[in-house]
Amino acid sequence: MRRDPVTTWLMRIYLVLFFGYLFLPLMVMGAATFNTSRFPTVTPWLGTTFQWFVELYRDGAMWTALWTSLVIAAGVIAVSVPIGLAAALLLTSLHARARSFVYGVMVSPLLTPGVIIGISTLVFWQRFGVAGGVFLSVVAQSTYIIAYVMLMVMARLQRFDRSLEEAALDLGASHLQAFRRVMLPYLRPSLLAAAVIAFLQSFENYNTTLFVRGVDTTLTIYIASKVRTGVTPAVNALGLILIVLTVLAAVLYEWRRRSERRRESIAARRREVSEAAEGGVGRALAAPAE
Amino acid sequence: MTALIRRFGLGLSALIIALPVFWIVMMIVLPELVMIDFAFRPNLLPAEIGGPKDVYTLGNFQTLVENTIHRAIFLKTIWASAFVTLVTLVVCYPIAYHLAQGTKPERTGFLILLLIIPFWINEILRTFAWFIILAYNGPLNALLSGLGLIDRPIRFLNGNFGVIIGMVYAYILFMVFPLYNSMESLDRNQIEAARDLGASAWRIHRRIVIPHAKPGIATGCIFTFMLAAGSYAVPALLGSPQSRWFTEIIYNWFFEGGNWNQGAAYAIVLLALCLGFILLMLRVFRVNLGDIAK
């Protein structure tokens, strides 16, 4: 595209500023981990140390919070993947009118502020005598995470070739077999991806969990309360570890997703080619069946 | 229904219906209704519940109207969230346009990966990063005084400034991706044609790019506003008692005031605010909800 040099340069400066804005704060936070200063900062630099990792390791409350977060995340995956899968399957079987209404209800938790989801879950379960804790955290977080799972499964389901399923049933497979052997393997990548997203969403949730946690503390709540009540670079050490893990996960996830997509487009092209070759015969065979 | 059973059999169909119904009824609809019911009832002692005093009332909403501090914080939350949304839109528009129309595809993939990475990082950590930068003895003050721009350090974390900058940072990607997705589908030839016919850059954006990107702009604004108005973490970490956010008042009613009914009423006001903003965006950009939820 033709561009005058002024625009090009302005764009370049903007890109540098934008990505600087995106990454510099995280770098500063990471760097502050290695400063001996008791308050996390990079100015002034008092000396380089690894002591904050040791301090973090010795912090029992951190380990308890980490465990709570993992238990809740496991619960969220167990609840939201099956329900999200069922919701996606249900939606694709509904008639157009009903579908858009039910779809609207199902995605509404994504358009609701997290605090509202926490509050409504809290007051609802209080009627059954259930107080805040791990259980309610799982319920409240799942309320909107199911919607993510549903959307991810739907995206893949739309490209599903129903004739595979019909073939299995025609050849005498039971409904359960067809589901387990045809549908589930096809949906496997999206279910795995949905589980990863569910885990991350649950792990990093703050606003919703705040209202339903009872006396339990998740890792995110622990970090926030540390920042408010007396922060040391041990929190930076924790942040740095989490960031490294997240970046690794993100790169791995993206890389997998891309190779998956590439493989699919190659397969689709091959199918097109073979269909074009067999087109005449195939169509002649298919016609009487319809 | 019959199609579902024919496709999955009776047992599986029952599950496929039962699980989403449980989700919708027990996790979405009933909790919201109970919260609304809570909001319209007075805060009573356990012994009084079901008694003569247990009637529907607007008293909890009246509190918000009459309490000048709460009212001011509510109004501040509205304008500050709208301001965050506007700043985020202005900051993100050029990058989204550049990604969608300005670069070669292989470079786009790399830049998008760069954008996604911070998106995966915990919101609390992204906010904490700004807590360090904006601290009284932090690097930003050190930089500004090093450049001779200020004599004394500024207390960034003492007002709305820190909260707003933290929110723009935290929600930037909820704006970039909807914008990018909507701009990507625009045919480059349209822009080329407009340029060949002598349209200025400003005119190309006003007449071609922005009209095409409307659903993306609406979606990004809705998400950003909803996240900003409903944020608890950012004002809690980057604000001070002088810059309280509406969500913090709600939290206090629940866990410090011990008045859940009052808290539920405030929560409903917040929900209504977000719904109102969604309707406003749909009206302004003339798109419907189906375009948004994609």
Image (spheres, rainbow, N blue to C red):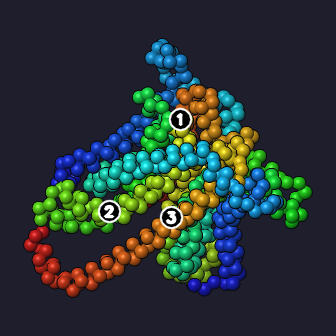
Could you give the CA–CA distance between mark 2 and mark 1, rounded to whole angstroms?
A: 36 Å
Instruction: Please determine if labels 2 and 3 lie on a single subunit.
Output: yes
**What is the three-letter code of the residue carrying label 1?**
Gly
Q: Which mark is residue B124?
A: none
Picture coordinates of residue A219, whole percent (x, y): 57, 48
**What is the three-letter code of the residue carrying label 3?**
Ala
Q: Disc 1 sits on a residue from what chain?
A: A
Query: Dot 2: what SS?
Result: helix
Instruction: Please determine if labels 2 and 1 lie on a single subunit.
Output: yes
Quickly name the residue at label 1: A214
Q: Residue at x 37, y 59 (%)?
A: A191
Picture coordinates of residue A151, whole percent (x, y): 40, 57
Q: Nearer the viewer, residue B225 or B140?
A: B140
Could you give the CA–CA distance between mark 2 and mark 3, rounded to whole angstroms?
A: 21 Å
Q: Please tell me whether mark 2 or mark 1 is closer to you in this view.
A: 1
The crowd level at tag 1 (other Cα within 10 Å; few <14, some 14-19, many 20+) is some
- Is residue A271 visible in the rendered image? The answer is yes
**What is the three-letter code of the residue carrying label 2?**
Leu
Quickly name the residue at label 3: A249
Quickly name the residue at label 2: A187
Q: Residue at x 19, y 82 (%)?
A: A279
- Say left or right for B263 vs A274: right
